[in-house]
Image: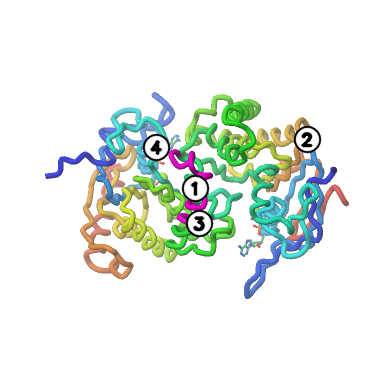
Amino acid sequence: MRAETPFVALDRVSLTYGGEGGGTLAVEGLDLAISRGEFAAVVGPSGCGKSTLMKLVTGLAPASAGSVAVGGQRVAGPLKIVGMAFQNPTLLPWRTTLDNVLLPLEIVEPHRAAFRRERARHVERARALLATVGLAGFEGKYPWQLSGGMQQRASLCRALIHEPELLMLDEPFAALDAFTREELWGVLQDLWLVRRFTCILVTHDLREAVYLADTVHVMSARPGRIIATRAIDLPRPRTLEGSFEPHFVDLVHGLRDRIAAARAEA
Amino acid sequence: MSTILRAEGVTRVLPGPQPVTLVRDIDFALSPGEFVAVTGPSGSGKSSLLYLLGLLDRPTEGRISIEGRDTAAMSENELAATRLARLGFVFQFHFLLPEFTTLDNLLIPMRRLGRWDEAEREDRARALLASLGMDEAAGKLPEQLSGGMRQRAAIARALANDPALLLADEPTGNLDTRNARTVFDIFERLVADEHRSVIVVTHDQEQAARAPRQVRLVDGRIVHDSARD
Ligand SMILES: Nc1ncnc2c1ncn2[C@@H]1O[C@H](COP(=O)(O)OP(=O)(O)OP(=O)(O)O)[C@@H](O)[C@H]1O
Ligand SMILES: Nc1ncnc2c1ncn2[C@@H]1O[C@H](COP(=O)(O)OP(=O)(O)OP(=O)(O)O)[C@@H](O)[C@H]1O
Ligand SMILES: [Mg+2]
Ligand SMILES: [Mg+2]
């Protein structure tokens, strides 16, 4: 009997880009509930509104109708309790890896006020975090001196350094080769198992969704809404070997069929 | 002092089992108020050169000095402080932080520098945005700006700490012709009115031609420098 309110709650949300009339209706009737500490994945056809969903939850775009709430508060502007990582390059080229990871502490309250005073402590934390993702020794390198996979590891560290309650990942591994991508599933799972932040991952890769998530939400073609939600009942920690076992493969196929149906309905 | 940046016999080799030479034998001196376009084939070392001249990378041979100081003698912290106070960077991607307004994005490097108090910083940032025709962007998130405006906001951020030199790597690579022109209009003004120096790496021949000084790289070497030849 859990009457607990979800940590992330979207209630009949729609968003139209470009105003009324000539605008694009990106999502409509979008309902979504994610519990505190849950790892959720969102999958769906290209252009269905997955990134829009991320912008709605983080407050980067206001809903045209319906309500978006995080931590029981209605979202009315950019949230400060989130960490974000995207497919785009976002590490600043003129800062070292370490300085990039420290960036949120330098600019997000309540850390900002004390940052200068507590810098040494934060540097230690950043180094420790970089070490957990295999980047010990690369603190002084610039992003363009790192491989794509290393850059995304550093991006994860930056997204997590201020210990956000919510981590938002929009196709963070899409630009990487398959091996690096699968390696980073393990890295992300390890971080989550230790810290248990609430996570929303948008991905095109159904194996990635099943490997990482507690729950996978399938979106319809645009205007996007959630048309299916699948609980992933696989034990953790999950492994790459496990991803070839029948139950894992069945889950992936089930999702693929659902998305194929969604595209056909469009 | 008439030279802001000087490279003498600069070579940069990436070590490894098969060492890669990024740039070689670079001699280059830049005066205040100079506007330089760097062009060359893909892989010719333009970005590598920009990182070196931007004090983000160190030569394996030769020396680079900024405002008369030899960078070899400077620690990483000193280099970072020099970059923060004297250099501004613009890339193809804007690198604005999505969760912060344009104004806040401009305030980040200013706070780090700590030269002005918060009220002065905000005044400066707003004036800077206004000078680039972006008054109304201050309170907006990068997401809410057009591509051209995002890049202008990135330029405003690069100018936030009043740099002597702006370094840009393919700053118009994501822009249409009209917005590309606007970016180069801004560069021209920074040079003519504010006596700053600009080094811009670009594939855009039309815009590159607007720079009074032309440098061409092939295979990591400067094969043409209009200031010399
Ligand atoms: N800033 C914007 N202005 C106008 N239309 C937009 C904007 N952002 C997205 N759209 C449109 O809204 C719809 C949903 O876009 P969104 O980026 O959310 O899709 P997506 O599911 O993330 O796509 P992809 O899988 O390709 O990343 C698309 O039709 C897109 O063209
Ligand atoms: N980290 C690296 N490891 C190996 N080779 C590298 C590395 N960085 C650059 N190179 C090589 O050095 C050469 C110069 O690269 P650089 O990026 O400076 O060229 P560029 O002129 O900027 O090219 P483009 O116009 O494509 O941006 C290229 O041959 C590139 O492949
Ligand atoms: Mg998307
Ligand atoms: Mg380049």
Q: Earlier in the sequence, mark 3 or mark 4?
A: 4
> The residue tagged with tag 3: helix, strand or loop?
helix
Whether residues under marks 3 and 2 lie with C-beta atoms below 8 angstroms apart, the answer is: no
Q: Chain of mark 4?
A: A
Residue A112 covered by magenta stretch: yes
Residue visible at 77% across and 55% down in the picture: B70
Q: Chain of mark 2?
A: B
Mark number, residue A230 = none
Quarter holding ligand 2:
bottom right
Left or right for B114, reference A205: right
Q: CA distance from mark 1 to mark 2?
A: 39 Å
Q: Position of residue A139 (x, y in %)?
A: 54, 59
Q: Quadrant of residue A247?
A: bottom left
For the residue carrying disc 1, how many other residues have a C-alpha within 10 Å: few (<14), some (14-19), or many (20+)?
Answer: few
Tag 2: amino acid: His
Q: Earlier in the sequence, mark 4 or mark 1?
A: 4
The residue at which mark 4 appears reads as A79
Which residue is farthest front?
A: A117
Residue visible at 80% across and 47% down in the picture: B30
The residue at which mark 3 appears reads as A151
Q: Quarter of the image containing the N terminus of chain B?
A: top right
> The residue tagged with tag 4: helix, strand or loop?
loop
The residue at which mark 2 appears reads as B195
Tag 1: amino acid: Glu
Q: Nearer the viewer, residue B58 or A33?
A: B58
Q: Position of residue A28 (x, y in %)?
A: 30, 34
Q: Is residue B50 above or below residue B85?
A: below
> The residue tagged with tag 2: helix, strand or loop?
loop
